[in-house]
Amino acid sequence: MFYHSPQDWRDASHKRVALFGMSGLGKTRLSAMLREEAEWFHYSVDFRIGTRYMGEHIVDNFKREAMRNPFLRKLLMSDSIYIASNITFHNLEPLSTYLGKPGDPAKGGIPFNEYVRRQRLHRDAEIAATRDALLFIRKAHEIYGYANFVCDMSGSLCEVVEPGNPEDPVMADICSAMLPVWIRGTEAHLDLLARRFDRAPKPMYYTETFLFDTWNRYLEERGVAPEAVDPDDFIRHGFRELLDHRLPRYAAIAQRWGVTVEAAEVSEVRDPQDFDALIETALARTTRA
């Protein structure tokens, strides 16, 4: 690991962590707190995906929708309007909108083959954006003078690496420069995330094996044709399964490459000093184990 003990962490002149785990358990809140209160550089993998690697795809998708409207089409064709994505650390809706949901176009769905194509684009983009963290560690220090660096990982990190492979190239990059920190939720946290998702289902990234298996079982169980699928119903259908699928993958990453903190512990972090203590505690647990 990048830090081997609480003392290593306390003595470090450059503190660097990569926070990973399910969306909604505190990664972005911690990152924003460190950025605003302790001058840490905050690198968001999802933001990098949506700007550097998927930005053109996202804007082209906006333009396709605009071209369907005669009024907007005329303005767009005459260069009278400009369409851009306003993605931020806290608003990743443009990226989610591009990923889309498969199913009935009348209900906002896209054809399954197109959905798979976009999933593949996202996978490549996430791998590249994750590995770019090393570039930004250098930029943060050399250009802006930041000593400390927090990488806010995508919730689907565990899907684009091989947790059982000790030579996984993406994890090798991360571990060469940062301490991976898994924020682990309890069953109660997962139930809460599932209820939130049920109220507002959003596009997700899946491995192709998981996606095809879930899609085919859904079609068989519901007895519907692909083009008749309710997009929101399909996304809801697979969400809890996705949580259960990802948990052992997160755990394997933490066991091999990093440390684990509990979501309940994260919720108690109020300032950078609390965060330092949280990492020290996690390192102490790992050392004892």
Image: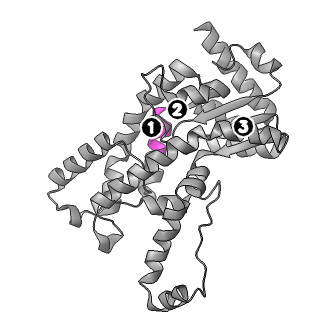
| Crowding near the residue tagged with mark 2, few <14, some 14–19, many ≥20 C-alpha atoms within 10 Å | some
Tell me the SS state at disc 1: helix
Report the amino acid beneath label 3. Answer: Ile
Most common SS among magenta residues = helix
Nearer to us in this view, 136 or 232: 136
Q: List x then y, in percent, for residue 143.
A: 82, 44
Point out the image quarter for the N terminus.
top right
Residue 229 magenta-drawn?
A: no
Q: Hey, what amino acid is under mark 2?
A: Val
Secondary structure, mark 2, is helix
The one of 13 and 264 positioned closer to us in this rendering = 13
Could you tell me if the residues under marks 2 and 1 are in contact, i.e. CB atoms within 8 Å? yes
Q: Which residues are magenta?
A: 185-193
Q: Nearer the viewer, residue 241 or 68?
A: 68
Cα distance, mark 3 to mark 1?
21 Å
Residue named by callout 3:
137
